[in-house]
Image (spheres, rainbow, N blue to C red):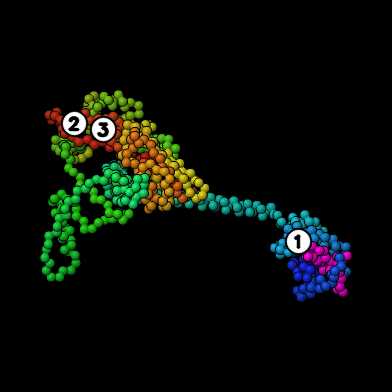
């Protein structure tokens, strides 16, 4: 048998799919297909029709479509009918139906199926429908393995990309945090911080990135002044009248700006004589474009001796608020302001320290302090000579390690909502009800410069969009205000971007029960007036 062409055509002779197996030009194929409807007539008794040169073997399909084989007249009609029946099964199996739209959509698949049944030259292959289906699927174990290896490499590359992106984000946030921290005023230990708009956990200073925030701040109580929420504390600043520049007549024309320089120098000299602030010709703006407040002039000491009792707290917590480590380092610092103060001794409550500071406590005196006198009488004095004038000297140090050293615990729960948004719940709790914390700032990195959507808050908040850091502020935390919570939503998917959380505050409640009993003169034993300052600040206080 020799099949010249296999086609699917309409009743009018329009070919939907046609596959030629011998060399035939297009005009001859179209002529043979156009003659088929005229030769077929209206008889339904036969499935073939012959001409002088070819034989048409056909089978009706659905919707007035015909599966047509054009063969030579010498071809075996029985084998041709068998080929026709097999093709009639293949067409709906490959195309999904015998409708015209299915035939057009799967034209190439039908041609490939015809090639599986008939070879080049028009000869029939010994095959079955299942074999044809398998061959058309072209399943290859090597191809599947290659695809699996390719998918594995793509997945590994995607994971590596995510890991590198996360590392880059962490480095970026670390750099932002370093820039943020470097912009804070660190004078006086940990007294002042970058959130000067809230007091910064210490005395107001200059240089903080939040300093000078006006009434446009966001928070829980309306508008804010430069030191907190509505109606918050705003220190009064007495403004000295600016000295007027002397009027110097100018004669003739002079080049340059020597007059302006002489004017500034003269004003600076006059301000120095009257102990006034240096005069500046124009306002200097901070990094946010807001003018910073001038630092107040330090008043001269009013007593011969100044004592500073300071504790610095180092706390590390996990994200659930459990304390991993907590340490306190304290120092008693002596400063002689006058000659009378250089010849002084300091007595402390040694007996009470021995009774209350037992396990976990350690005390050490300065090497120049008479240790024997301190151990027996609790008196701190130099072995020989007097204290240096106007230079602070740490005469006693103490340290303590224990969970009760941490006055405040914070736990933070960021949850990925799965829609490109993260819901964050953060709360704090005061562990030491005897302690009063002032100007508490909880600094939370956001991982983005987008503003958060506050859902619930105790206290106030501000966001620095430049560094992507949020400040949750409380003026005071004590036994009457021992806990608080904050809930907000923000765009993102990395829950690790909100750590570490840093806590800053100031307090005058020492953990060590040390007290200065007296300051006396080594010359006559009389009392010496002194000023005592107590300071408790965090050295490093983080939840990570």
Give the labeled residue for mark 1.
98
Q: Image quadrant for the C terminus?
A: top left
Q: CA distance from mark 2 to mark 3?
A: 15 Å
> For this view, does 6 lie left or right of residue 387?
right
Stretch in magenta: 45-72
**What's the residue at 28%, 55% (across, down)?**
285
Give the labeled residue for mark 2.
519
Magenta-colored segment: predominant secondary structure: strand
Could you classify mark 3 by the number of other residues whose Cα lies within 10 Å: few (under 14), some (14-19), or many (20 or more)?
Answer: some
Residue 431 disc label:
none
* The magenta stretch spans residue 8: no
Q: CA distance from mark 2 to mark 1?
A: 110 Å
Give the labeled residue for mark 3.
396
Of mark 2 and mark 1, the one earlier in the sequence is: 1
Q: Quadrant of residue 302?
A: top left
SS for tag 1? loop
> For this view, does 495 lie left or right of residue 15?
left
Closer-to-camera residue (95/274): 95
Q: Position of residue 262 (x, y in %)?
A: 15, 60
Q: Position of residue 433 (x, y in %)?
A: 34, 32
Q: Image quadrant for the N terminus?
A: bottom right
């Amino acid at each position: 048998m020799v099949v010249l062409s296999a086609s699917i055509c309409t009743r009018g002779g329009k070919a939907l799919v046609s596959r030629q197996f011998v060399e035939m030009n297009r005009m001859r194929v179209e002529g043979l297909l156009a003659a088929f409807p005229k030769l077929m007539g209206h008889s339904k008794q036969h499935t073939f029709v012959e001409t002088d040169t070819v034989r048409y073997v056909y089978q009706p399909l659905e919707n007035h479509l015909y599966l047509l084989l054009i063969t030579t007249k010498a071809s075996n009609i029985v084998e041709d009918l068998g080929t026709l029946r097999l093709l009639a099964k293949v067409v709906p199996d490959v195309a999904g139906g015998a409708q015209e739209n299915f035939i057009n959509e799967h034209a190439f698949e039908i041609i490939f199926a015809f090639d599986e049944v008939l070879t080049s030259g028009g000869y029939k292959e010994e095959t079955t429908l299942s074999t044809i289906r398998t061959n058309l699927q072209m399943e290859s174990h090597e191809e599947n393995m290659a695809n699996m290896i390719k998918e594995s490499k793509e997945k590994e590359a995607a994971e590596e990309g995510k890991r590198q992106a996360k590392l880059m984000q962490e480095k970026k946030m670390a750099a932002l945090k370093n820039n943020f921290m470097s912009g804070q005023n660190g004078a006086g230990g940990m007294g002042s911080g970058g959130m000067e708009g809230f007091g910064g956990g210490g005395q107001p200073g200059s240089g903080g990135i939040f300093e000078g925030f006006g009434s446009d701040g966001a928070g829980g109580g309306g508008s804010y002044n430069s030191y907190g929420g509505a109606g918050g504390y705003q220190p009064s600043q007495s403004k000295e009248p600016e000295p007027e520049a002397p009027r110097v007549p100018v004669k003739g024309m002079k080049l340059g700006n020597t007059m302006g320089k002489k004017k500034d120098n003269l004003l600076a000299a006059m301000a120095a004589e009257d102990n006034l602030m240096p005069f500046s010709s124009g306002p200097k703006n901070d990094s946010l474009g807001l003018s910073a407040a001038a630092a107040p002039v330090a008043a001269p000491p009013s007593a011969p001796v100044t004592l500073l009792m300071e504790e610095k707290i180092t706390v590390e917590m996990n994200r659930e608020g459990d304390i991993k480590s907590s340490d306190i380092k304290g120092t008693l610092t002596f400063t002689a302001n006058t000659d009378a103060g250089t010849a002084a001794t300091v007595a402390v409550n040694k007996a009470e320290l021995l009774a209350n500071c037992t396990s976990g406590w350690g005390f050490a005196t300065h090497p120049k302090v008479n240790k024997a006198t301190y151990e027996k009488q609790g008196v701190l004095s130099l072995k020989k000579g007097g204290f240096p004038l106007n230079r602070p000297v740490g005469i006693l140090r103490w340290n303590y390690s224990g969970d009760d050293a941490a006055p405040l615990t914070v736990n933070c729960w960021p949850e990925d909502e799965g829609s490109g948004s993260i819901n964050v719940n953060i709360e704090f709790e005061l562990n030491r009800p005897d302690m009063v914390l002032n100007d508490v700032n909880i600094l939370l990195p956001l991982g983005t410069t987008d503003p958060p959507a506050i859902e619930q808050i105790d206290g106030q908040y501000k966001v620095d969009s430049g560094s992507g850091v949020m400040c949750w502020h409380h003026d005071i935390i004590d036994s009457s205000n021992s806990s608080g919570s904050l809930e907000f939503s923000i765009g993102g998917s990395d829950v690790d971007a909100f750590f570490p959380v840093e806590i800053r505050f100031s307090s005058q409640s020492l953990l060590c029960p040390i007290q200065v009993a007296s300051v006396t003169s080594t010359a006559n034993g009389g009392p010496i007036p002194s000023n005592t300052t107590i300071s408790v600040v965090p050295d490093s206080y983080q939840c990570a």
